[in-house]
Amino acid sequence: MENCLFCKILSGEIPSQKVYENDYVYAFRDINPQAPVHVLVIPKKHLASLDDTDNASDRDLAECLRAVRLIASRENLANGYRVVSNCGPDACQSVHHLHFHIIGGRKMEEKMA
Ligand code: 5GP
Ligand code: ZN
């Protein structure tokens, strides 16, 4: 997708700090971390958000969640972590390529929103 920031990160046009990659997903550190660990997991296939998953294979989606677990383990988040996917304007989604935030390394606030 032209003009998609995360597609540009995938192609290497925009640099990123890679955390994990396989045939289906790519994960990298958020440029503006909200916690000691803040990683973004994205499918390599461009999907705008969770509302766009009719265009995704089950594998594309499952690999995102498998990567979350693997990265949480590698980042030593045994005490817990939060996974967030902002979808649409009410959730303040700012990049329109599906992504899962992995946030951890400190105690989260109980209130989520
Ligand atoms: P959203 O608000 O769409 O859920 O999350 C987008 C995330 O992308 C934000 O947390 C923001 O900090 C991150 N982000 C925006 N631009 C870049 C960038 O160029 N590089 C990286 N690594 N993260 C970015
Ligand atoms: Zn994209």
Image (cartoon, helix red, strand yellow):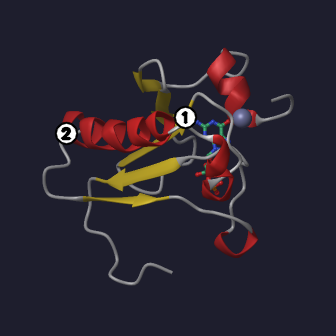
Please, what is the three-letter code of the amino acid marked with disc 2?
Ser
Q: Which residue is drawn at 56% across and 46% down?
A: 99
Q: Which picture quadrant has residue 82?
A: bottom left
Element marked by disc 1: strand
Q: Which residue is drawn at 49% across and 49% down?
A: 100
Sequence-first tag of 1 and 2: 1
Q: Which picture quadrant has residue 71?
A: top left
As drawn, 29 above or below 52: above
As drawn, 91 above or below 110: above
The N terminus appears in which quarter of the rendering?
A: top right
Q: Tell which of 110 and 25 is nearer to you.
A: 25
Q: Which residue is drawn at 64% across and 71% down?
A: 91
Q: Which picture quadrant has residue 111?
A: bottom left
Instruction: Residue 73: give its label.
Output: 2
Q: How crowded is mark 2: few (under 14 residues within 10 Å), some or many (20 or more)?
A: few
Q: Residues within 10 Å of mark 1 (few under 14, many from 20)?
A: many
- Tell me the residue that label 1 is attached to: 43
Please, what is the three-letter code of the amino acid marked with disc 1?
Pro
Residue 106 on image: x %, y %: 26, 60
Element marked by disc 2: helix
Residue 5 on image: x %, y %: 74, 35
Badge 1 residue CB within 8 Å of ligand 2: no
Q: Tell which of 52 and 112 is nearer to you.
A: 52
* Foreground tag (1 vs 2): 1
Q: Is residue 90 left or right of residue 75?
A: right
Residue placed furthest toward the left: 78
Q: Which residue is drawn at 71% across and 65% down?
A: 88
C-alpha separation, residue under disc 1 versus residue under disc 2? 19 Å
